[in-house]
Image (spheres, rainbow, N blue to C red):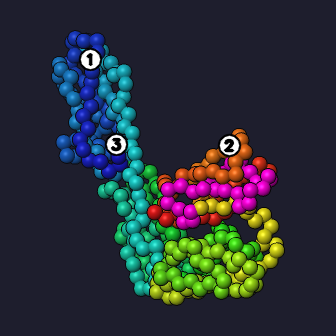
Amino acid sequence: MVCGATNPVTFTINNNNNTTGITGYTWNVGTVPNGWLYNGSAAPATIAVTSTTLSPLTLTPDCGKALSNVSAIVTANGNNYNTTNSSTVSITQPSFSISGSSSLCSGSGSYSVTGMPCNASVAWAAPPSNMANLSSLTASPTTMTYAGTSGSFTLSANVTACNITTPVTLPVHVGPYTSSNYSLSVNGVVSSNPLYWCSNQNYTFSVLGGSGSNYNWSVPSGWSILYNNGTPLALRSPSGTTPATGTVSVSFTEPCGTIVTLNKTVAYSNNGCSGSSIYSVSPNPASTNITIACISLQTYCNIAAVQITDINGTVMSSQSWSYTNQQVQMPVYFLQNGTYIARIYSGTQWYSVTFFVQH
């Protein structure tokens, strides 16, 4: 039963051998406190019954307390017989979580543990004193107050119910976010270096590190926008080599209302062309299927295998072929809107092409 349940439980002695001469029986409910209520009061350790018939015993869990196992001894023909089995009571814990905002911009907010049964207790861990404080470390709900220093920490509590302690956590950021809380990734990679780009290639820029809204992007001259979902943003580099340098910039509103700006320098370089794809993906964006094809029908261009991954590298689907292909189709109808990467194996080398799904 679930910890905190208060529904009555009935225990029955089965006379499997049809023994005669029964004069009584004794229920062993467990050393007091045993967690049971009998007729509305705390159950004693034993309950003796004088009777020639075996009647069931009904006990009620004392909410939130550990429960003892129950057994019985039957007296028949002047002898005491232990019942073959005791009734083992198995307790499962409810699901606990912390309810409250993950962003406390200023002032105070209420935080509580959900799912606590009666007679449960909570012990909160004090947050960093320069960031926040709690009105009580033993009450739910408790009030968290911003202490003046912005930052992130994990709010944690230990919930004890039915003699079992369960930890629960909630990541919390207090105060306004700054640019140091975020980063700008390109094709899933975060780097402090400039993006060295190659002509006619797709690049996906994503804001990482926290939530935001009202994303406004600025892109260099010659770059075209393929897909804009606030974040991510997909761009196509110029067909030539100029302008050689530029800046991709994004401004957005962090959860507390402050405008944050991130920048990424882009610079043309032959180094950016190493391993450039010899394949195309169309249509882009796609909705139902994509066609992967060799850009130029050269003898060395082959498609031996394809993996479709999200921008974090999780493989969403894959397929391989034992024969030569210069064009294949893959379904994408099951993918959610967003940015994906087609990883194409030529038989000797892997290539990557970014594409987008828009239903």
- Measuring 21% from the left and 29% from the top, which residue is drawn there? 56
Label 3 SS:
loop
Amino acid at dot 1: Asn
The residue singled out by tag 3 in the image is 1
Q: How crowded is mark 2: few (under 14 residues within 10 Å), some or many (20 or more)?
A: few
Q: Say whether residue 264 is visible.
A: yes
Across and down, in percent, residue 214 comes to 47, 82
- Measuring 64% from the left and 56% from the top, which residue is drawn there? 292
Quadrant placement of the N terminus: top left
Is 4 in front, or is 288? 288
- In the image, residue 130 sits, relative to residue 16, either above or below, namely below
Across and down, in percent, residue 294 comes to 70, 57
Is 193 in front, or is 87? 193
Task: Tell me, yes or no, whether the highlighted magenta stretch contains residue 291.
Answer: yes
The residue singled out by tag 1 in the image is 15
Label 2 SS:
loop
Q: What stretch is highlighted in magenta?
A: 283-308
The residue singled out by tag 2 in the image is 321
Across and down, in percent, residue 304 comes to 71, 47
Is 93 in front, or is 191? 191
- Measuring 76% from the left and 76% from the top, which residue is drawn there? 196
Dominant secondary-structure state across the stretch colored magenta: loop
Task: Tell me, yes or no, whether the highlighted magenta stretch contains residue 41.
Answer: no
Amino acid at dot 2: Trp
Of marks 3 and 1, the one in the foreground: 3
The circle drawn on residue 335 is none
Across and down, in percent, residue 15 comes to 26, 17
Of marks 3 and 2, the one in the foreground: 2
* In the displayed structure image, the side of residue 242 where residue 55 appears, left or right: left
How many numbered callouts? 3
